[in-house]
Image: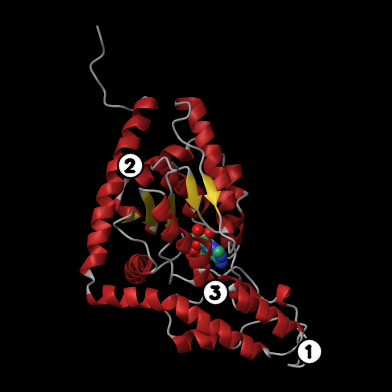
Amino acid sequence: MSRIFSGIQPSGELHIGNYLGAVKNWAQLQHVHAGSIFCVVDYHAISGNYDPAMLRARRWGMAKSLLAAGIDPAHATLFMQSDVPEHTELSWILTTITPIGDLERQTQFKDKSTKLESIPAGLLMYPVLQAADILLYRADAVPVGEDQIQHLELARDTARKWNARFGEEFFPEPRPLLTPTRRIVGLDGQAKMSKSLGNTVGLLETDDEIWAKLRPAMTDPARVRKTDPGNPDVCNIFQLHKAFSDTDTQANVVQQCTTAGWGCMDCKKVLHGNMIAEFTPIRERAAALDAEPQRVLDALADGGRAARAIAQETMAEVRERMGMGALTLPSA
Ligand code: ATP
Ligand code: MG
């Protein structure tokens, strides 16, 4: 049986891209794979510029949102990365076998670093810490969105290299688990929806807030007038229907769009209703956690304990195999 591990940065609100690409899948996989492990990766979130008070609020918000989205502490381990110091220890170890060229080639590094005047080394090392996150739990399957495929390739290379030098087949080579909605584009239709780009729709936003974002959202650019037929295949709103609407509704959207039966606003209203329907139980769980916030702390405390137990066991073995186990007196 595969061991599932995945993480999410507390770098902003949990949005529909995170949910459809990863977190919804986590909530399903936890019932199939006993002992699944999910992590709020706060060490990753400090690899860019950030405000400490904001980070504190976002760490809380992300833990609560994950529980609201369906991560169940009775089935899975949910913890805060910085509660398990072994992540940074293994990360250092893995930097010693990772070629800088491989890190400089990472698309995410290139995207994020071009916007900066001075590039923190941590941004370059981000995928090494990510490899450490996964390998620490000797996970072999990692449910993520499409943007993480390249980082996972690097994690597989890293596992292979470490195994070849220090312990054949100790670390499994982790593979990505993707969803049909592996890449959600922001509502401007320009770039991947990302917390750091501010083009998100949050899972816990109100009906009105979500509608205020959907209303001006980009559709088929060739459909200028309501009477022009549209092409759903190039419309981001149709991509979201594929995620939130049932197949009958999707077929109707195609029919109404291609015959100009509906205007884009009609189409967006149907999507809005279906999104709200999916978010209603999530909002209810979030409200219950707001009323009883200690449950968030308890889940993280239990999760941290469970994660540390596995991490410490892995690191004892890693240190031993690398010649860094406890010293004993030299034999005479
Ligand atoms: P940031 O902008 O700070 O990098 P993010 O929105 O990209 O934030 P991450 O914490 O980096 O979110 O990623 C968490 C998970 O969500 C990862 O598995 C990632 O692949 C997935 N994910 C992020 N954005 C999308 C998206 N637009 N579509 C599908 N999956 C996504
Ligand atoms: Mg990201």
Viewer-nearest of discs 1 and 3: 3
**Residue 248 image-quadrant placement:** bottom right
Of mark 3 and mark 2, the one earlier in the sequence is 3
Instruction: Identify which amino acid the numbered label 2 is placed on.
Output: Ala
55 sits left or right of 249 in the view: left
Q: Which mark is residue 311?
A: 2
Q: Secondary structure at mark 1?
A: loop
Can residue 98 be seen by looking at this rendering? no
Can residue 102 be seen by looking at this rendering? yes
Q: Residue at x 33, y 43 (%)?
A: 86
- 294, above or below 328, in the image: below
78 sits left or right of 146 in the view: left
Q: Position of residue 162 (x, y in %)?
A: 49, 32
Q: Position of residue 4 (x, y in %)?
A: 43, 48
Instruction: Identify which amino acid the numbered label 1 is placed on.
Output: Asp
Q: Quadrant of the C terminus?
A: top left
Label 2 near label 3: C-beta < 8 Å?
no
Instruction: Identify which amino acid the numbered label 3 is placed on.
Output: Phe
**Residue denoted by label 3:** 244
Q: Which mark is residue 228?
A: 1
**Separation (CA) of disc 1 from disc 2:** 58 Å
Of mark 1 and mark 2, the one earlier in the sequence is 1
